[in-house]
Image: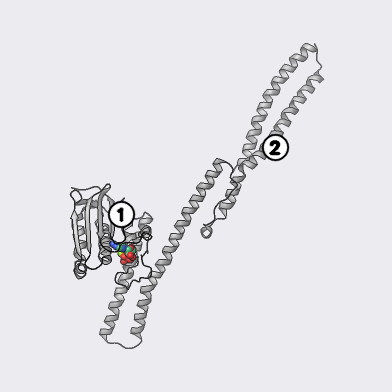
Amino acid sequence: MRSLRRSLAIRFAATMAAGLLVATAAFYWAASRALEQAVPAPSAALEADLLLALGAVVVCGTAATLMGAWHFTSSAVRPVAEITAQATHIEAGTLDQRIVAHADTEEYEGLVAVLNRMLERLETGFAAQRRLTADMSHELRTPLTALRGEIEVALRADRSPRDYQIVLRSALEEIDQLTTLSEDLLLITRADAHVLTLHRESTDVTALVEGAVERLRTRVTRRDLTLNRAFRAGAERASLDPELAARLVDHLLENAVSQTPEGGTVAVTVEPGGLGVRLIVENSGPGIDAADLPHLFEPFYRCDPARTRDDCCGGPGLGLAMVSAIARLHGGAARATSAPGRGTRFEIDLAVSPVN
Ligand SMILES: Nc1ncnc2c1ncn2[C@@H]1O[C@H](COP(=O)(O)OP(=O)(O)OP(=O)(O)O)[C@@H](O)[C@H]1O
Ligand SMILES: [Mg+2]
C-alpha cells in the first residue's frame, strides 16, 4: 500500500525537478551563446564548470523541494493519522466516544462530522438492541417462572387427574403467551432486518375489519362500548398481505377496545390514502401523554411501566411495534395522535395497489 504522504512528496519533488531541468537547460543554452560571443573560444573546463553548477542547482533544488514537501504533506495528512488511531479504538462497548481529530480544513472537518454522526447512529442502534434483549429476557422469564412454579407445586404430592388437568391447562396458557410473544418478536425483528417477504393478494379490507370486530364482539358488549365503522369508496379491496393486515387490524382494535373506558366509543375508518389505503382507529378516553407518544411504536414500550401483564389489559408492549413493522413492510407508516381527555387516534397508511 502506498503512503499518501510519500507519494505526494515524491510527485511534488518530481514536478520541481522537471521544472528546474527545463529552466537550467534554457539557462545553459543562453549562457553558452553569451560565452561564445564574449570569449570566441571558451575552454572546455569553463563549459564543464557551468554544467556542473547547473547540475548542482537541479539536484539541490529537487532535494530541498522533497524535504519541504515531506514536511508540508506530513502536517497536511496528520489529521488522517489521528482519525485512524481514534477510530481504531472505538468498539461495541465504547460507542459513546467521538472522534476529536485536529481537523483544521473543511474536508477533514466534514469527514470527522460524518464519522461522528455515523457513531451516533450506531450508538442509538446498539442501545435499542441492548434494551430489546434485556426486555425480551425479562418478558420470557415471567411466564417461565410461573410455569415452573405451577409444575413444582403439582409434583409436590399425588394429585387427582382433575388437579393435573387444571395445572396442564394453566401451563398451556403460559405456553400460548410465550408462543405469541416469540411470534410477535420474530415478526418485528425480521421486518427490521428486511428478511420478511410480503405475500400480497387481492384482500377484502371490509371483511378484514368486520372479522376483527366480530372477534371482539363479546368484550365490546361487556364493556358497553359503541363501535362504529365507516368504509369510504375506493378502499374496499386492496393488494395486501391478508394475514399480516389482519394482525394489524386485530391489534389496533384490541388496543382501542381495552383502552376505552366503559361506555366509550371506538371508530374505525377505511379510506383511500395518499399511498393507497388508510386505516384510522379512534377511541374515546383520557388519551396518551405527549411524552409517551414518540415511544409508542418501540418494542416493549408501555405507557404505564408499573402495570404488569396480569392487569386488565396488560400485554408485553409488542402490539404497536408489530403494527408499525407491518405498515413499514407494506411500504407505509403508522402514526398516533392524542389530546388529553379527547381520546386517541391511530392512522396507518399502507402502500398498496388497489385491486378491482
Ligand atoms: N388506543 C389506545 N388508547 C390509549 N392508549 C393506548 C392505545 N393503544 C395503545 N395504547 C398505549 O400504548 C401502549 C403500547 O401498546 P402496545 O399495543 O404496543 O402494547 P400492549 O397493548 O401494552 O401489549 P401487547 O399489545 O403486546 O399485548 C399500551 O401500554 C397503552 O398504554
Ligand atoms: Mg396492545
Quadrant in which the N terminus appears: top right
Residue 218, visible in the rendered structure: yes
For the point 48% across and 53% down, the residue is 120
- Identity of the amino acid at label 1? Ala
Q: Position of residue 247 (x, y in %)?
A: 27, 60
Q: Look at mark 1 in the image and give the residue it sits on.
A: 327
Per the image, label 2 sits on a secondary structure element best described as helix
Q: Position of residue 131 (x, y in %)?
A: 43, 63
Q: Position of residue 39 (x, y in %)?
A: 80, 12
For the point 34% across and 67% down, the residue is 181
Left or right: residue 93 versus residue 257 is: right
Front in this rendered view, residue 22 or 215: 215
Spatial distance from mark 1 to mark 2, Cα to Cα?
Answer: 63 Å
Per the image, label 1 sits on a secondary structure element best described as helix
Left or right: residue 13 versus residue 244 is: right
Q: Look at mark 2 in the image and give the residue it sits on.
A: 67
The quadrant holding residue 255 is: bottom left
